[in-house]
Amino acid sequence: IGPPLVFYQIMLGYSIPDPDQIRWENFHGPSLSDWYSDFWSTKLMAVLFLFSFCINGLFVHIDSASSWVKIDVLFRELNHCRLKNTSEILLKMGAFMNLWVIIWLCLDTFVVLGTAQTLKAVLLDSLGLMFLYNLDDIGADLGFVNEDDWPGLQLAWLHKRIPAYAPMLDDVKEFQADRCCQGFLIVGQILLMILAFSLPVLLVFTPLQELIPDPLYEESIVRQLDFQKLVKEIVANVTLKGSLEL
């Protein structure tokens, strides 16, 4: 639930200090104003990282979908013998969660990197998003399931050999992967292709830096309750000293 909560918080501004909130009411349409400001280098790096992240997510999903089809076929062939402590529902849930995380992190990358104000912030935020991206993988930073716990080579050997020996064995049959889940993975692939090309273009023409108020202006002057008193003191100081020095 982390990736959708990140997107929800940044887009709506909940639990975020006022200077860091996105003022969507100030958005008046596409603009290239960010590229003509001092943030052009940060914007360029954010666009490149966003495009790379989305393209990487697309290829990772294609590879994961191909692996899932092979695993599901192998599971159905082996489960014909009634394997213990196994569940195809959890296998399908794994395919769904993998696509869920990739899509939400692509959206998170758009809002997180788009609102970054320095190159350092872009790099550090990208590292944080990559940590979430790899968190559910086998052998990732969390050690709940290591690579040694997943018999990938053995399963690959079985998947390659079963079609050759299935006709000679009465208790082994060939099956096809779940078509419903295959369709879901294809739809996810199309959606990721759309995001991979639409999000960078959208970031190019969305002036996100203009939608974030200046923290010094907002906090130290406009949002102070004694703003009128401050102006009166400045005017009085100028009048008494007879100069414009404050």
Image (tube, rainbow, N blue to C red):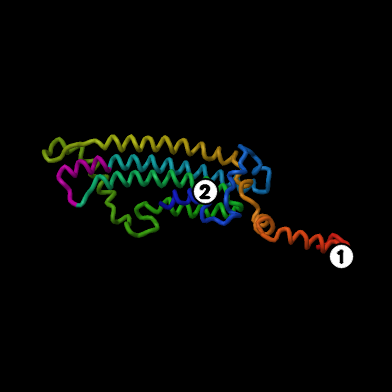
Q: Residue 237: x, y in percent?
A: 82, 64
Residue at 28%, 40% (x, y): give it: 70
Query: Measured along the vertical axis of the image, is residue 22 above or below residue 183?
Result: below
* 3D distance between C-alphas at marks 1 and 2: 47 Å
What residue would you read off at disc 1? 241
Residue at 47%, 35% (x, y): give it: 194
Crowd rating for badge 1 (residues with CA inside 10 Å; few <14, some 14–19, many 20+): few
What residue would you read off at disc 2? 12
Looking at marks 1 and 2 on the same chain, the residue that comes earlier in the sequence is marked by: 2
| Furthest residue toward right | 242
Q: Which of 20 and 99 is in front in this view?
A: 20
Task: Point out the stretch of residues depicted in magenta.
Answer: 71-84
Find numbered disc 1 in the image and state the secondary structure of the residue it sits on: helix
Assign the C terminus to one quadrant of the image. Answer: bottom right
Characterize the magenta stretch by its predominant secondary structure. helix
Q: Which amino acid does label 1 sit on?
A: Lys
